[in-house]
Image (tube, rainbow, N blue to C red):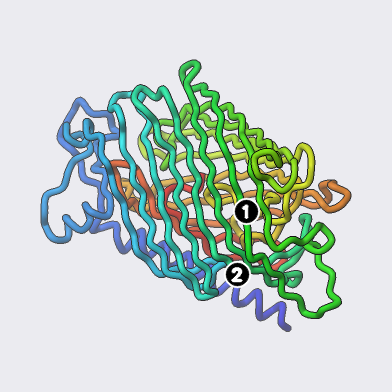
Amino acid sequence: MRKAEKIKKDLKFRTQYISFFLYLYYGCLPLFAQQTINDSSMSSANKYLEMDISDIINKITKKSYMLPNDTIFLNSKGPFITPLLIPGYAMVTGFLGEITCNISFYTLRNDTAKISTISTTDLYSQYKQFMNIINSNIWTNNNKFNLLGDWRYYVFPTNTFGLGSKSSLSDATKIDYSHLRIYEVIMTKISNNLFIGAGYNLDYYWNIKETKDSANEVTDMDRYGFNSTSTSSGLTANIQFDGRLNANNPENGTYANLQVRDNATIIGSNSNWQSLVLDCRHYFEVSKVNHNVIALWSYDWLTLNGKPPYNDLPTAGMDSYNNTARGYVEGQYKGLNFLYAEAEYRFRVLNSGFIGGTLFTNVSSFSDYPSNKFTAIDPGYGVGLRIKMNKKSNVNLCFDYGIGVGGSRGFVFNMGEVF
């Protein structure tokens, strides 16, 4: 009976979600309909007026707005600032208030210039979680150097579910910790889109606490090794190929980044351990007219040697942008090794580009402990809505609903595409 009620609720939710999506399409179509620019020299792909949220406001208030072929539009280096203050909801945080901002700019404006981006997020949730995140991807003049940063501070009561790919939502135990992360890498160009570089990674956790149902309970965190603090301090070696021009919303190109991290006690780490992360992405532009895209992503995190602290193990949803394993609560799966793949179809709903959508599917696998073998695969899939926030930097506001196995499902929010 409960199963039938659950299926009925799921069908009701999906019907409401599809109805909302169709309402946006058919209800907004008259307002945001395509408008042809009278310029015969332009390709058919550019004859439609690109529109973002500011254009919509200007259109409603009958103010002028900038065409995507205007000289100022084409030559501007920015900065293009997209701030947003929103209430929201996520599986790991519950209801939340969030201030997020995407700052994009060019150091040089030509056909091969790559856009630089700084993204900031400040969040406070109903579970008394606080997050401050600063991600940066900065290109110097002529793309000679690439500076990559991931700085964050967390106060984060949450759940942990154990190790491997077979954990379920019922395996949750409460943990609490504070976390300081400082990742910084500098890359230098050796040819075209190929770069090599070095960096430093610091993960410091303190006030780590685990709340158990009983004093005699032994969790995977106990079996792996519990400590109230941990420090991982390591140098990194990096090789990167980046054929994308705009990482906010790539329409074509290939990206690959290989990082080897060597954590050593001599530079402050609690223990010596080494890891490898391989991040590969490829984008196919299905049509130059509607700019629909097929995007592919592979993200693999391997422990090469030693034993990382429990909180530093690869975890579902804990990549640099917290985007892996949509459909699963952040932290549901964890292990010494992590293999991941995802495919996404991105399409326009309106020719103006103001509203779009996505269909996605992914698979995850974490190694068990202590065998370190891969014994299960966790699939996920879902749909999403895209709203163009800034056409100059091509930044979308992304709302996704993902579904996993074992009853795991929920919303994911992003400023900029997931990958």
Say if residue 16 shows up in the picture.
Answer: no
Front in this rendered view, residue 135 or 412: 135
Q: Earlier in the sequence, mark 1 or mark 2?
A: 2
Q: Classify mark 2: helix, strand or loop.
A: loop
Say if residue 378 shows up in the picture.
Answer: yes
Circle 1/circle 2 CB separation < 8 Å: no
Residue 83 lies in quadrant: bottom left
State whether residue 199 is above or below residue 143: below
Amino acid under disc 2:
Pro
Q: CA distance from mark 1 to mark 2?
A: 21 Å
**Quarter that holds the N terminus:** bottom right
Residue 28 lies in quadrant: bottom left
- Label annotation for residue 325: 1
Q: Position of residue 303 (x, y in %)?
A: 75, 41
- Label annotation for residue 54: none
Amino acid under disc 1:
Ala
State whether residue 151 is above or below residue 131: above
Q: Position of residue 392 (x, y in %)?
A: 28, 41
Q: Is residue 272 left or right of residue 141?
A: right
| Residue beneath the point at 31% across and 38% down | 105
